Image: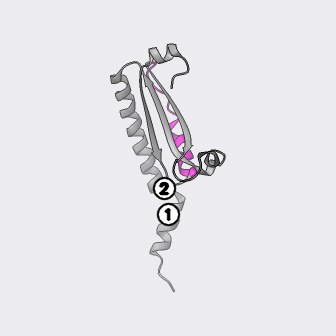
Amino acid sequence: MPANADEATEFPFSLVISIPLPTNRLASAALQAIQVDQELSSLVRRSHALVARTGSVEQADIDDDDENKTVLETTYHATTNRMLRVSVNGFMETLGVVLGVMEELDVDVLKEEAGATETPK
């Protein structure tokens, strides 16, 4: 939500995108890769955060443990719905690249695949 009422009036269109990832390490890596690129238009504001998944575990217990923060949450505020759409499209393209690289190069994935292809002696 915008910081104040004037900002809410100036940026009336908003969207929150939540991307659940398997671990905090992967969520942190995605956050670091994505937050480097600043929003190109002054008509759009974007912020990122890592949050915990909600579910059967008490929220108070989740908030204290960074390891449980596995959801990359991106919040957009824009002056027009068109500017919001254009920015989100660019974000989705970047996110696709980041997730693709993580899938191809993640160390844990490589260890798991190597273990699956080894034959017992």
- Pointer 1 with pointer 2, Cβ within 8 A: yes
Q: Which residues are magenta?
A: 24-42
Q: Is residue 3 left or right of residue 43?
A: right
- Name the residue type under label 1: Leu
How far across and down, in percent of the image, does residue 50 sit? 56, 41
Seen at 40% across and 44% down, the residue is: 96
How would you rate the neighbour count of disc 1 (Cα within 10 Å): few for under 14, some for 14-19, many for 20 or more? few
Q: Earlier in the sequence, mark 1 or mark 2?
A: 2
* In the depicted structure, whether residue 38 falls above or below residue 11: below
The furthest residue to the right: 64
Colour basis: one colour
For label 1, the residue is 110
| Residue at disc 2, secondary structure | helix
For label 2, the residue is 105
Nearer to me, 106 or 74: 74
* In the depicted structure, whether residue 109 falls above or below residue 36: below
How far across and down, in percent of the image, does residue 44 sit? 44, 22
Q: How many marks on residues?
A: 2
How would you rate the neighbour count of disc 2 (Cα within 10 Å): few for under 14, some for 14-19, many for 20 or more? few
Q: CA distance from mark 1 to mark 2?
A: 7 Å
